[in-house]
Amino acid sequence: MARGDSGGSGMVGLREAADRLGVHYMTVYRYLRTGRLPAVKVAGEWRVRAADVEKLRSPGATATGRGSRRAWAMGRMLDRLVAGDEVGAWNIVESALASGAEPAEVHLELIAPALRAIGERWAAGSVSVGEEHRASVVARRVLSRLGPRFLRRGRKRGAVVLGAVAGERHEIPGAIVADQLRGAGFDVVDLGADTPATSFVTAAERVAPVCVLVSVTGSGHEAAVAEAVAALRSGARCRVLVGGAAVPNEQTARRLGSDRWTGRDARHVVAAVEELLAAPDGG
Ligand code: B12
């Protein structure tokens, strides 16, 4: 008889299922509620088929441990985004949160890598333009739903203005950074995609920010970045950080006129803004 398989019935309890899947008990309960794991009540207790539990384990999930579970969840997120399945994508987020993931980890370990993988598939031709667009809409909606978890009460540490440079339509990296900055106690003015240089200046004049973050993901936006940086330096006289996937290192950051390199992910961006806050004279 298999471990935890009471009576050799091929059925196991929820705690045993949780152990086998390497997830929290409440996560298994959520699988029941959302229909991912069929269950029956026997003498007042939920039982699930051991074979169904096995099916829930991905090929990579035989290894337990947080890393492999997150990798598995990321694969499922990728799959749900490509399918345009908002409910399924949100269920994965809820499961991750229920198993103890921080909202920032959901950003950086589930949603962002899934989107980058979709980009690779799009470039390789295995995901269509339409699927990529639909996936990014679903990702955006899931991010919006997660957003309130980053809100903090209390006194703010300062304001930050953020926007993707003129011509740049990738605004999801900015949405992620904005929420993580909010979680770190900053007030964020997110100007979204395709922001004209003058709009950066107007927003900065209004809120006197710790800095303005100019986001650039794709190639070919150098002229627009130069225009935004010049307008901010002369118009708003504030500190400017240029970052995003098109700024892969310190050298590129400096060449584009950034006061600092913001690093590779949102956590590094938050750290860069905090450094500026700690060095008020521009150090
Ligand atoms: C979704 C998506 C789109 C969506 C964007 C929707 C939206 N609402 O944002 C749409 C469909 C509009 C789109 C359009 C295009 N896209 Co596109 N897109 C993507 C995709 C799949 C995901 C982007 C994303 O959100 N990534 C997730 C985030 C979280 O990734 P991230 O960069 O790691 O973000 C972190 C860092 O940037 C970091 N960071 C560090 N410092 C700083 C500083 C600041 C200020 C910020 C904000 C962040 C930051 O923090 C972020 C969070 O951790 C990427 C694939 C990829 N590799 O990202 C392609 C990708 C970026 N797109 C690409 C291309 C080519 C295009 C198009 C030119 C396609 C076309 N021919 O039409 C257009 C360009 C439109 C334009 N003018 O900008 C290429 C870019 C290649 C290049 N080097 O130029 C990519 C890489 C796909 C690929 N593999 O080729 N796209």
Image (cartoon, rainbow, N blue to C red):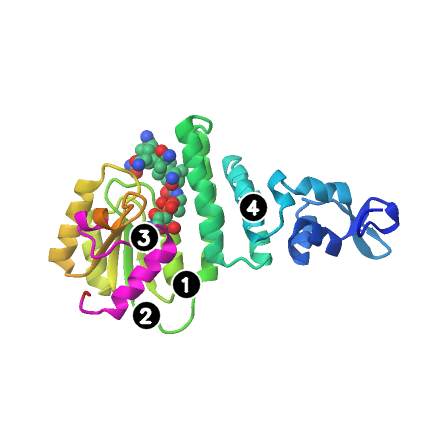
* Residue at the farthest top position: 125
- Report the side of 220 relative to 184 (left or right): left
The x, y position of residue 113, in whole percent, is 45, 44
The x, y position of residue 251, in whole percent, is 21, 48
Q: Is residue 173 visible?
A: no
| Identity, as a three-letter code, of the amino acid under mark 1 | Gly
Q: Mark 2 points at which residue?
A: 157
Q: Mark 4 points at which residue?
A: 73
The x, y position of residue 282, in whole percent, is 18, 65
Distance from the alpha carbon under mark 2 to that under mark 1 = 11 Å
Asked if disc 1 and disc 4 are in contact, CB closer than 8 Å, the reply is no
Q: Residue 263 carries which label?
A: 3
The x, y position of residue 12, in whole percent, is 79, 50
- Considering the numbered disc 4 on the image, is that residue within a helix, a strand or a loop? helix
Distance from the alpha carbon under mark 2 to that under mark 4 = 34 Å
Residues packed near mark 3 inside 10 Å, few (<14), some (14 to 19) or many (20 plus): many
* Label 2 within 8 A of ligand 1 by Cβ: no
* Residue at the farthest front position: 63
- Upstream in sequence: badge 3 or badge 2: 2
| Identity, as a three-letter code, of the amino acid under mark 2 | Arg
The residue lying at 81 percent from left, 47 percent from top is 2
| Identity, as a three-letter code, of the amino acid under mark 3 | Gly
User: Which stretch did the figure color magenta?
Assistant: 253-281
- Considering the numbered disc 1 on the image, is that residue within a helix, a strand or a loop? helix
Q: Nearer the viewer, mark 2 or mark 4?
A: 4
| Identity, as a three-letter code, of the amino acid under mark 4 | Ala
- Upstream in sequence: badge 2 or badge 4: 4
Q: Mark 1 points at which residue?
A: 183
